[in-house]
């Protein structure tokens, strides 16, 4: 029986890790469907960004109460994982509280810390659920989140509440079993939070208590393995990808739009034909029509987005009722990329499906509303740039489809012919100066 | 007051200390021309030897690039860099944050490397060096001024303090809008929006921003960008507050207040 449980545990752990690794591989493959981009420079600055923005959650602290609550969940998640290590080893070895004899007095102290954090996580998750569903914070009830995204968010919070409760129930019943001197339940000393739950289980028979303790233990660890496999399908993937995304954050001035060397060269060769190489082939396409045309960093951005909507809450276009929502740009990019990924899974390589990110997922009206003000970029706690994607899609609209509002076409022709966006004579450019002279 | 072009300076064998990049708005827009003139007056008063490109200046390509027309942007950049490099320009000042951003951040990669500063930064330097001295009891003394952050100065280039420091020199009372500095709300003009109608929505960005500025009770809304200036002025006019609240560029305020 003992060995059967161990075997079952090992089987569960291996399948959970295998499935997770497989999905991670798919996501990695999807991200690298994007265009090459060399971000291997400035390692020191990038590590600093990772420490400040991802680990230190610097941008979250624009709103201190929320940042602290988020930090409790984050710290809790990381630190409680030390306890998960013991649980996994116990599962494999068929032991119970393996670290207790190894750590002695420190063990009780550690579990107490985990319990305080677990309670913290639990309370914050309840508050976050309330904020989402009853306080109806604007960015959390936006139509961007209709359907699955809203369910996803609630599911994550509820799962965390359940996992934390199971951890505390497990410890509470364990302490009762210790008091009763049950075999295998070695004395750990009292735990500060779970001991408060003990009255709930007072008077239960030893076998019932063992049943509850074991059930809590199994459901807790099975829940963790299940959650691990839920992550890659969820917005919650940010807990992992926020780190690489902060590392690969744009280091240039946010005002700098990425250069297109192929267009730069086309113009150069048109102006100075003697510089053109004999076999210069024009670029295949300009800007981004689909996810393949975006950079891998844009696609990493899409998977890193946790749909918090801070970008959209700051977007001047969205605030004034325009269709554009930077968050939706990121969600649409991920949705399209996932669709492309499924297509590849089924067909070995991508088979044209007659769809594209531009038009089918992101409309012209959305793209046209952007003022390139960088508010979304500034707002994002995990260094995502919706603006980058917007500009790439605009490039495709203009340069591939010649799809511009009439006023923009006039602006372009004015710039080209009169060297100013308005229809003034270039001869009058310094008229103001002659006015000053007289 | 004689404003020299680079061509004239070259012909006289002279080299300016700095090139004043006027920009399209500053050159052609009637409202923005006043900013240009105010800034040129300041430069002349402090005795800084400057020149303009005159008819040789052309749009930097900022709106074209942001609208998605990279070809047009590259054409303008090529042309401007040829002219600037031809005159061996080292240092540029501009009153337009869009030109500033493009010249400073986007031209270097294309072969145009210059020291580029925004006029508010130059004004701050001139005040610090004692070259700009304010009149006693200037017209802004003790008045409420609210500064509107331009996206292309602030978020794009991290310039938040220089404009505010210059305004402090006016001995005025600076009042901040609810959304300021990194959280500043755009005026609605960037990304080539200036040159087309708004997309359908519930309100206009410049109206929201003007309302926010009016809420501060400031008598003056200070701008540091000709496009912000237009957008904020339109917003204030729309609320029929133009007789009570003036939208002015920082250069205009300094020109009016300096000795």
Image (cartoon, helix red, strand yellow):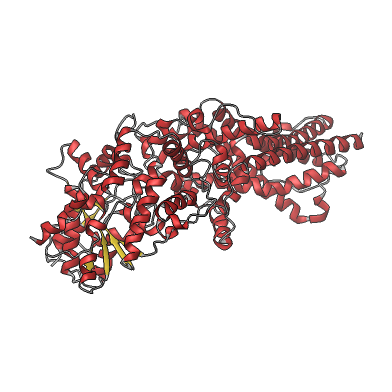
In the displayed image of the protein, which residue is found farthest to the left?
A: A438
Quick check: A4 above or below B93?
above
Quick check: B22 above or below A167?
below
Task: Give the position of the N terminus of chain A as an image quadrant.
Answer: top right
Residue A227 falls in image quadrant: top right
Q: Position of residue A251 (x, y in %)?
A: 50, 56
Of residues B151 and A381, the one drawn nearer to the viewer in this rendering: B151
Residue B159 falls in image quadrant: bottom left
Is residue A372 at all visible to an observer of this figure? no
Of residues A93 and A292, the one drawn nearer to the viewer in this rendering: A292
Direction from residue A262 to residue B242 in the image, left or right: left
Residue at the image point whose x is 38% and y is 57% from the top: B158
Residue A409 falls in image quadrant: top left
Of residues A411 and B231, the one drawn nearer to the viewer in this rendering: A411
In the displayed image of the protein, which residue is found farthest to the bottom?
A: B13
Task: Give the position of the C terminus of chain A as an image quadrant.
Answer: bottom left
Q: Position of residue A106 (x, y in %)?
A: 74, 56
Q: Position of residue B203 (x, y in %)?
A: 30, 32
Residue at the image point whose x is 40% and y is 35% from the top: A402
Residue at the image point whose x is 37% and y is 50% from the top: B75
Q: Position of residue A413 (x, y in %)?
A: 30, 41
Direction from residue A309 to residue B62 in the image, left or right: left
Direction from residue A299 to residue A310 in the image, left or right: left
Residue at the image point whose x is 48% and y is 42% from the top: A286
Quick check: A178 above or below B101?
above
In the displayed image of the protein, which residue is found farthest to the top?
A: A147
Is residue A83 at all visible to an observer of this figure? yes
Looking at the image, how many numbered discs can be counted on the residues? 0
């Amino acid at each position: 029986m003992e060995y059967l449980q161990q075997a079952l545990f090992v089987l569960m752990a291996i399948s959970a890790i295998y499935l997770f690794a497989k999905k991670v591989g798919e996501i990695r493959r999807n991200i690298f469907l994007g265009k090459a981009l060399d971000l291997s420079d400035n390692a020191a600055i990038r590590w600093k960004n990772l420490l400040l923005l991802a680990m230190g959650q610097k941008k979250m602290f624009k709103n201190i109460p929320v940042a602290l609550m988020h930090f409790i969940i984050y710290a809790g998640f990381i630190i409680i994982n030390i306890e998960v290590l013991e649980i996994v080893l116990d599962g494999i070895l068929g032991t119970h509280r393996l670290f207790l004899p190894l750590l002695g007095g420190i063990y009780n102290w550690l579990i107490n810390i985990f319990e305080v954090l677990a309670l913290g996580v639990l309370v914050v998750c309840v508050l976050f659920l309330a904020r989402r569903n009853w306080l109806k914070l604007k960015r959390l009830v936006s139509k961007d989140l209709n359907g699955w995204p809203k369910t996803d968010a609630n599911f994550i919070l509820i799962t965390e509440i359940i996992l934390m409760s199971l951890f505390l129930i497990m410890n509470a019943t364990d302490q009762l079993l210790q008091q009763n001197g049950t075999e295998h339940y070695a004395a750990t000393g009292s735990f500060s939070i779970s001991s408060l739950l003990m009255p709930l289980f007072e008077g239960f028979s030893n076998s019932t208590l063992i049943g509850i303790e074991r059930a809590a233990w199994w459901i807790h660890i099975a829940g963790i393995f299940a959650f691990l496999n839920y992550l890659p399908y969820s917005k919650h993937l940010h807990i992992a990808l926020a780190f690489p995304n902060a590392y690969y954050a744009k280091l240039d001035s946010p005002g700098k739009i990425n250069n297109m060397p192929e267009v730069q060269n086309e113009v150069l060769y048109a102006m100075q034909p003697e510089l053109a190489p004999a076999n210069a082939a024009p670029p295949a396409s300009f800007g981004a029509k689909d996810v393949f045309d975006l950079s891998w960093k844009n696609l990493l951005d899409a998977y890193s987005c946790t749909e918090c909507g801070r970008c959209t809450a700051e977007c001047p276009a969205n605030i004034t009722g325009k269709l554009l929502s930077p968050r939706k740009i990121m969600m649409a990019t991920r949705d399209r990329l996932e669709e492309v990924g499924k297509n590849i899974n089924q067909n070995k390589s991508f088979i044209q499906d007659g769809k594209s990110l531009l038009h089918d997922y992101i409309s012209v009206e959305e793209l046209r509303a952007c003022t390139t003000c960088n508010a979304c970029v500034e707002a994002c706690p995990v260094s995502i740039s919706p603006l980058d994607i917007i500009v790439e899609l605009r490039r495709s609209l203009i340069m591939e489809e010649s799809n511009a509002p009439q006023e923009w076409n006039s602006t372009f022709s004015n710039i080209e012919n009169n060297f100013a966006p308005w229809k003034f004579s270039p001869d009058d450019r310094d008229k103001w100066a002659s006015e000053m002279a007289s | 007051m004689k404003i020299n072009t680079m061509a004239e300076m070259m012909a006289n064998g002279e080299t300016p200390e700095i090139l004043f990049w006027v920009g399209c708005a500053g050159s052609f827009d009637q409202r923005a021309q006043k900013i240009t003139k105010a800034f040129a007056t300041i430069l002349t008063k402090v005795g800084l030897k400057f020149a303009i490109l005159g008819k040789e200046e052309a749009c930097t390509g900022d709106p074209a690039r942001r609208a998605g027309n990279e070809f047009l942007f590259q054409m303008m950049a090529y042309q401007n860099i040829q002219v600037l490099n031809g005159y061996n320009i080292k240092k540029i000042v501009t009153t337009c944050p869009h030109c500033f951003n493009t010249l400073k951040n986007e031209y270097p990669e294309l072969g145009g490397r210059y020291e580029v500063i925004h006029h508010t930064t130059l004004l701050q330097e001139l005040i610090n060096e004692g070259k700009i001295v304010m009149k006693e009891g200037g017209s802004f003394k003790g008045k409420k001024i609210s500064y509107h952050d331009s996206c292309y100065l602030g978020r794009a280039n991290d310039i938040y303090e220089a404009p505010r420091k210059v305004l402090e020199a006016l001995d005025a009372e600076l009042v901040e809008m609810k959304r300021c500095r990194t959280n500043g709300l755009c005026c609605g003009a960037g990304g080539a929006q200036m040159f087309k109608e708004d997309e359908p929505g519930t309100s206009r960005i410049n109206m929201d921003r003007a309302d926010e500025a009016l809420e501060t009770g400031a008598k003056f809304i200070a701008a540091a960008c000709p496009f912000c200036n237009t957008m904020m002025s339109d917003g204030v006019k729309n609320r029929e507050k133009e007789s009570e609240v003036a939208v002015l560029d920082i250069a205009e305020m300094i020109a009016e207040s300096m000795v």
